[in-house]
Amino acid sequence: MTLLYFAWLRQKTGCGEEQLSLPADVKTVSDLVLFLQKRGGGFEDAFANLRRIRVAVNQDHCGFDTKLRDGDEVAFFPPVTGG
Amino acid sequence: MITIRIQSEDFDIAAEIAKLDAENTGAVATFTGKVRKEGDLTALSLEHYPGMTEREIARIVDDAQQRWPLLGLTIIHRIGRLTPGEKIVLVAVAASHRSAAFEACEFLMDYLKTRAPFWKQEERGGKTQWVEARHSDGKAAERWRDK
């Protein structure tokens, strides 16, 4: 799967895009967040407060309970501030 | 005609309105968002999620077309580093009558602000800071939900 990070999530994680094989125990976005938090460092810092984070799966806004499949594109970002 | 563009270059409002004009247009409403000149703000940098931005704006446009009888619509959103006074966004809507044009223009802006994946970073006094989403923008978008 492809993981994307935008705005301060990209800065804190030090990563804009990465490829990841779906870990066996990751079934939902929430599971993926737990997996990423366990990396520690910038990832732990970036995912410290989930109320400040929004997620899109395959370019659709969605909730943290969304189920994941290998090959999905998952993006993490702060609430949007365009316009 | 539906036009959606994400670009770093500036745009010409008059030229965009001229392109939008359909034969039976009776009303064109436009909104232009600009970088405010305020305090020590030196620039805004805008980034977006290529691919999702276009999809999300297309969804918002579909929604607007189901709500109002629109004859044409143009949305241009700039990205990159913009300085105070520069234009950020244009929404222009053509319809037969003014109420549809006004309402659709406001709806499109409210949804752009709360759904389209853009993020602004401010530069003030040599330091950068990400702009926080405003609760009032969420409220503005919510009021369309039951209409």
Image (spheres, coloured by chain):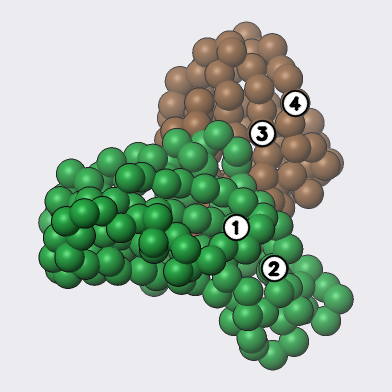
Q: Which residue is mark 2?
A: B82
Image marks 1 and 2: residues in contact by CB distance under 8 Å:
yes
Q: Secondary structure at mark 4?
A: strand
Front residue of A34/B129: it is B129
Question: Can the viewer see residue B108?
Answer: no
> Which tint was used for chain A?
brown
Residue B58 spot, x, y in % from top left: 38, 40
Distance from Cα at disc 4 to Cα at disc 1: 26 Å
Q: Residues within 10 Å of mark 2 (few under 14, many from 20)?
A: many
- Left or right of residue B114: residue B51: right
Image quadrant in which the N terminus of chain A is located = top right
Residue B128, above or below B22: below
**Secondary structure found at label 1:** strand
Same chain for mark 1 and mark 2? The answer is yes
> Which chain has been coloured green in this picture?
B
Q: Which amino acid type is shown beneath numbered disc 1?
A: Arg
Q: Amino acid at mark 2?
A: Leu
Q: Are marks 3 and 1 on the same chain?
A: no
The disc placed on residue A4 is 3
Residue, disc 1: B78
Is disc 3 in the same subunit as disc 2? no
Q: Position of residue B102 (x, y in %)?
A: 24, 69
Camera-near label (4 vs 1) is 1
* Residue type, numbered disc 3: Leu
For residue B18, which quarter of the picture?
bottom left
Side of B10 where A56 appears, left or right: left
Quadrant in the picture for residue A13:
top right
Q: Which residue is mark 4?
A: A18
Q: CA distance from mark 3 to mark 2?
A: 24 Å
Residue at (69, 12) in percent of width and height: A21
> Do discs 4 and 1 share a chain?
no
